Image (cartoon, rainbow, N blue to C red):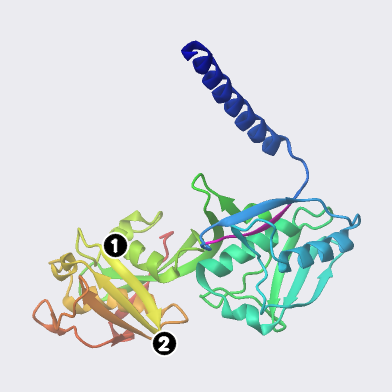
């Protein structure tokens, strides 16, 4: 009896492995369509297989748009087009560019959830033969990023699914960074072209670049600039609320670099962040608490506004 039980267990295990393998091969060999949406926690793009009834390009687009507005069959998946969002119109150009016109409610969705919805819609529609790229319009205006730049043309290849199942979206932007001049007493503006994952806020990217320092920028003239953020400083948190950017550094930020003045250290952060459209002021905190003075000379408890009096020049990274 023990021998029979053993072989029965082995057969069950083998059957499980074979079935699992068949399922994997089935997914890999599947050549049909998918409807993309969001996972239940709105942290990544999800999908389910779908067999359309339409045949030509325009009918497939309409069918897919309707399907993305319907409740998914998968209970662990959320639809890409929420209930309060309507699609007023769509237009397909002869070149295969699909323009989708959403009502104003789409503008209520921001950050990662919006990017994931955008990814799901674009990935679904770019499967349609004859659709090369997609553009979004909200209340008749082109969809813009948090940096108030037009998102423009999108393709499925711009949305990357990494090994963790998360989705990122590549975008290009210019960050106007402020580092110290070589004397340490003034600021130098350095425009930096970046390609970044749009699921990461620009204010976080800007601060992280400041923390890396100017010498990490390819083509920078190292004789013209100095870093401003003290070595070892960590960014604990950064948020934007009502046009004020709240930046929480580790206590290492208080260990000012000897090569730069206190004003230069502070306003390198402030001026860099205020270059972003949604930010007018910057409020600092240290390890979650408020500090009243920076380096015993500069008041640190109130929000800071941009200070252009400290800026002496603009430096090209190609100099």
Q: Is residue 39 magenta?
A: yes
Provide the secondary structure element on which disc 2 rests. Answer: loop
Would you name the residue on which mark 2 appears? 242
Horizontally, is 39 left or right of 191 in the view? right
Q: Which residue occupies the extreme top position in the image?
A: 3
Q: Is residue 73 magenta?
A: no
**Of the numbered discs in the image, which one, if any, rests on residue 225?**
none
Task: Give the percent coordinates (x, y) of residue 26.
Answer: 70, 35
**Of the numbered discs in the image, which one, if any, rests on residue 211?**
1
Horizontally, is 199 left or right of 284 in the view? right
Provide the secondary structure element on which disc 1 rests. Answer: helix
Task: Give the percent coordinates (x, y) of residue 208.
Answer: 34, 62
Which span is picked out in magenta? 34-40
Q: Which residue occupies the extreme left position in the image?
A: 296
Mark yes or no: residue 154 visible. Answer: no
Q: Residue at x 15, y 70 (%)?
A: 254
Q: Residue at x 61, y 25 (%)?
A: 15
Q: Quadrant of residue 242?
A: bottom left
In the foreground, 311 or 207: 207
Q: Residue at x 29, y 62 (%)?
A: 211
């Amino acid at each position: 009896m023990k021998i029979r039980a053993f072989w029965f267990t082995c057969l069950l295990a083998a059957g499980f492995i074979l079935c699992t393998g068949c399922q994997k091969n089935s997914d890999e060999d599947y050549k049909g369509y998918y409807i993309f949406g969001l996972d239940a926690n709105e942290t990544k793009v999800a999908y389910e297989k779908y067999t359309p009834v339409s045949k030509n390009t325009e009918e497939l687009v309409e069918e897919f748009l309707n399907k993305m507005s319907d409740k998914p069959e998968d209970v662990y998946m959320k639809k890409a087009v929420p209930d309060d969002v309507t699609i007023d119109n769509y237009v397909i150009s002869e070149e295969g560019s699909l323009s989708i016109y959403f009502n104003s409610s789409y503008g209520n969705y921001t950050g990662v959830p919006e990017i994931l919805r955008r990814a799901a819609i674009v990935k679904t529609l770019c499967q349609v033969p004859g659709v090369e790229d997609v553009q979004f319009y909200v209340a008749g205006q082109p969809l813009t990023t948090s940096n108030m730049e037009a998102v423009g043309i999108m393709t499925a290849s711009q949305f990357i699914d990494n090994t963790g199942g998360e989705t990122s979206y590549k975008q290009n932007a210019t960050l106007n960074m402020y580092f110290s001049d070589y004397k340490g007493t003034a600021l130098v503006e350095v425009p930096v072209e970046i390609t970044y994952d749009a699921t990461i806020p620009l204010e976080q990217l800007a601060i992280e670049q400041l923390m890396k320092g100017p010498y990490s920028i390819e083509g920078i003239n190292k004789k013209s600039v100095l870093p401003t953020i003290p070595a070892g400083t960590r960014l604990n948190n950064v948020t934007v609320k009502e046009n004020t950017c709240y930046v929480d550094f580790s206590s290492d930020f208080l260990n000012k670099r000897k090569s730069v003045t206190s004003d230069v250290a502070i306003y390198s952060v402030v001026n860099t962040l205020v270059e972003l459209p949604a930010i007018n002021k910057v409020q600092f905190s240290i390890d979650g608490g408020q500090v009243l003075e920076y380096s015993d000379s500069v008041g640190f408890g109130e929000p800071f506004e941009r200070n252009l009096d400290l800026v002496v020049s603009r430096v090209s990274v190609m100099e």
